[in-house]
Image (cartoon, rainbow, N blue to C red):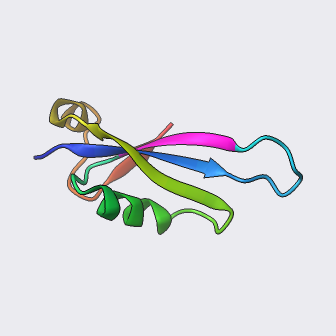
Amino acid sequence: MANGQIVLVTTIQISGEEPTPEVWFVAEEDPSKAEAIVKEHTAPNEIVKAVAPLPEVAVRALGLKPGEFNHA
């Protein structure tokens, strides 16, 4: 197992309200690949950005296998 990525998904509200952020944890070491994994599960009005590495110990604690993700 390797490090993963913390990915921030920000939903741009059509109503003009404040954007809504959500944190995703992705078991993918490469930031661009982690973003691509998340983009497969998000809407066009959501901005996806890898913001920090996720230590291997956290990937294991979350029970993630390579390519898997969890979001809060």
Left or right for 9, reference 12: left
Residue 51 x/y as whole percent:
40, 43
Residue 15 belongs to the span the image colors magenta: no
Region in magenta: 20-25
Q: Residue at x 36, y 50 (%)?
A: 69
The image quadrant of residue 5 is top left
Left or right for 16, reference 67: right
Left or right for 54, reference 24: left
> Looking at the image, which is closer to me, 68 or 55?
55
Residue 40 x/y as whole percent:
47, 69
Q: Which residue is drawn at 25% across and 39% down?
A: 63
Q: Residue at x 16, y 37 (%)?
A: 56
Q: Is residue 59 above or below residue 35?
A: above
Q: Which residue lies furthest to the right in this view?
A: 15
How many numbered marks, from 0 up?
0
Q: Which residue lies furthest to the left in this view?
A: 1
Q: Is residue 35 above or below residue 69?
A: below
Q: Is the magenta region chiefly helix, strand or loop?
A: strand
